[in-house]
Image (cartoon, helix red, strand yellow):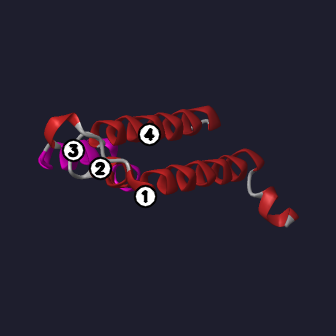
């Protein structure tokens, strides 16, 4: 399995999790929880949990501070993962 295959899988999983989170912003579960469930498990499980929650009345959106926090935490984690993946662990030894 090549580096680019793993990189493509990680990036596509994160993008699908963001899409599920955006879909969840119109439901009671909200963006943050939809995104977090999709990131921890799989985007498919996150989509099922999002679809099981009730829609918000009048087309409201629920973002909350957890959505921003989880998105920033996910981006930082992705950067650290990519650094470790591309340097082969030499980044840890340099610290």
Disc on the earlier residue, 1 or 3? 3
Look at mark 3 in the image and give the residue it sits on: 27
Q: Which residue is mark 4?
A: 13
* First along the sequence among labels 4 and 3: 4
The residue that mark 2 highlights is 30
Crowd class of label 3 (few under 14; some 14 to 19; many from 20; radius 10 Å): many
* Looking at the image, residue 53 lies above or below residue 11: below
SS for callout 4: helix
User: What residue occupies the far front of the structure in this picture?
Assistant: 58
* Quadrant placement of the C terminus: bottom right
Number of the front mark, 4 or 3? 3
Q: Is residue 66 left or right of residue 8?
A: left
For mark 1, what is the residue? 66
User: Considering only order in the chain, which callout, 4 or 2, is on the residue closer to the N terminus?
Assistant: 4
Q: Position of residue 32 (x, y in %)?
A: 38, 52
Q: Are marks 3 and 2 in contact (CB under 8 Å)?
A: yes
Mark 2 vs mark 1, CA separation in Å: 9 Å
Image quarter of residue 24: top left
Q: Identify the residue at image location x=63%, y=37%.
A: 3
Q: Residue shown at 53%/52% (left/top)?
A: 74
Q: How many marks?
A: 4
Image quarter (top left, top right, bottom left or bottom right) of the N terminus: top right
* Range drawn in magenta: 38-54
Check disc 3 and report its element: helix, strand or loop. Answer: loop
Q: Distance of mark 1 from mark 3, alpha carbons?
A: 15 Å
């Amino acid at each position: 399995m090549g580096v680019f295959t793993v990189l493509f899988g990680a990036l596509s999983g994160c993008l699908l999790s963001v899409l599920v989170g955006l879909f969840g912003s119109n439901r009671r579960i909200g963006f943050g929880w939809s995104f977090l469930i999709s990131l921890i498990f799989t985007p498919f499980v996150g989509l099922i949990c999002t679809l099981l929650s009730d829609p918000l009345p009048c087309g409201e959106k629920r973002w909350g501070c957890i959505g921003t926090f989880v998105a920033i935490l996910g981006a930082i984690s992705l950067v650290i993962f990519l650094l470790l993946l591309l340097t082969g662990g030499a980044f840890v030894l340099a610290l």
